[in-house]
């Protein structure tokens, strides 16, 4: 069974610190990797996507992918209280329509 | 543009009752999806429609049926609701099935007693 694993948290970081969120996946055929943010009671929204090994930066967010280790991470620099949410990791196998989601990591940024 | 809309926002059903969850998008997207989200289980795909006129099963299709009414609308039907179907249901759409960005609706909270 294809699995996407995330630490459920909560992960607490002080305002201004770097938050590091991690995700591992079991399917070596996975080709596309995504981070969604979900505020409590709201719907998920895509914040980052990454397809090749290495880092991808977008503003305060950096996604990191290591396919050999089957590991993808999200770094949030200068964390703000507004970043407090659940972060969902999702992966998609090459040629598949389906996204497989992890259970999410709850992040709390303390002012 | 409203994006992806879902009705109703909240529904309570008794075991055995039927209902249809409605979803519509105004982004001219080809692909649409139905997910359920349960505590501790994450988001799981129920059904999807890669394009108008086609539907396919996802990870957890049992107990559900779908209809892609037209390009804009994709409905999810529970014929005989069970307590195990208590969940939050999200509809999503994307430009096409190869597009990674899926836009989610606000969700429908369903409680089956």
Image (cartoon, rainbow, N blue to C red):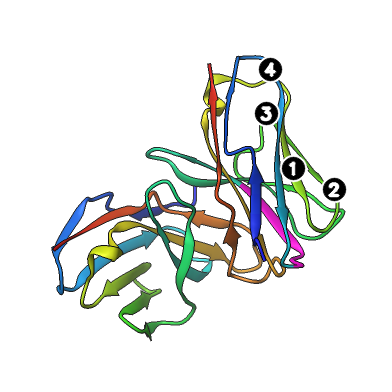
Chain bearing tag 1 is B
The disc placed on residue B63 is 3
Per the model, the C-alpha gap separating discs 3 and 2 is 19 Å
1 or 2: tag closer to the N-terminus = 2
Foreground label between 3 and 1 = 1
Residue to which mark 4 is pinned: B17
Per the model, the C-alpha gap separating discs 1 and 4 is 17 Å
Q: Give the secondary structure at mark 4.
A: loop
- Specify whether A72 is left or right of B11: left
Q: Give the secondary structure at mark 1.
A: strand
Relative to A18, residue A54 above or below? below
The disc placed on residue B69 is 2
4 or 3: tag closer to the N-terminus = 4
Q: Give the secondary structure at mark 3.
A: loop
The 10 Å Cα crowd at callout 3, few under 14, some 14 to 19, many 20 or more, is some
For the residues tagged 1 and 2, is the chain the same? yes
Q: Are marks 1 and 4 in contact (CB under 8 Å)?
A: no
4 or 2: tag closer to the N-terminus = 4
The spot of residue B3 in percent (x, y) is 64, 62
The 10 Å Cα crowd at callout 4, few under 14, some 14 to 19, many 20 or more, is few
Foreground label between 4 and 3 = 4
Q: Are marks 1 and 2 in contact (CB under 8 Å)?
A: yes
């Amino acid at each position: 069974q294809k699995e996407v694993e995330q630490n459920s948290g909560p992960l607490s970081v002080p305002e201004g610190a770097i938050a590091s969120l991690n995700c591992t996946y079991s399917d070596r055929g996975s080709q596309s990797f995504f981070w969604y943010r979900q505020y409590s009671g709201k719907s998920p929204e895509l914040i980052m996507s990454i397809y090749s090994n290495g880092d991808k930066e977008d503003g305060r967010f950096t996604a990191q992918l290591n396919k050999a280790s089957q590991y993808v991470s999200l770094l949030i620099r200068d964390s703000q209280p507004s970043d407090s949410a659940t972060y969902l990791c999702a992966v998609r196998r090459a040629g598949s329509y389906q996204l497989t989601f992890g259970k999410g990591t709850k992040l709390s940024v303390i002012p | 543009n409203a994006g992806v809309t879902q009705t109703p926002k909240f529904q309570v059903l008794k075991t055995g009752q039927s209902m249809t969850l409605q979803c519509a998008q105004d982004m001219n997207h080809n692909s649409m999806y139905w997910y359920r989200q349960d505590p501790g289980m994450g988001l799981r795909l129920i059904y999807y429609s890669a394009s108008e006129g086609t539907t396919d099963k996802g990870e957890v299709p049992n107990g559900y049926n779908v209809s892609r009414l037209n390009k804009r609308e994709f409905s999810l039907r529970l014929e005989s609701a069970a307590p195990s179907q208590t969940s939050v249901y999200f509809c999503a759409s994307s430009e096409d099935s190869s597009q990674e960005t899926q836009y989610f609706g606000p969700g429908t909270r369903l409680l089956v007693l």
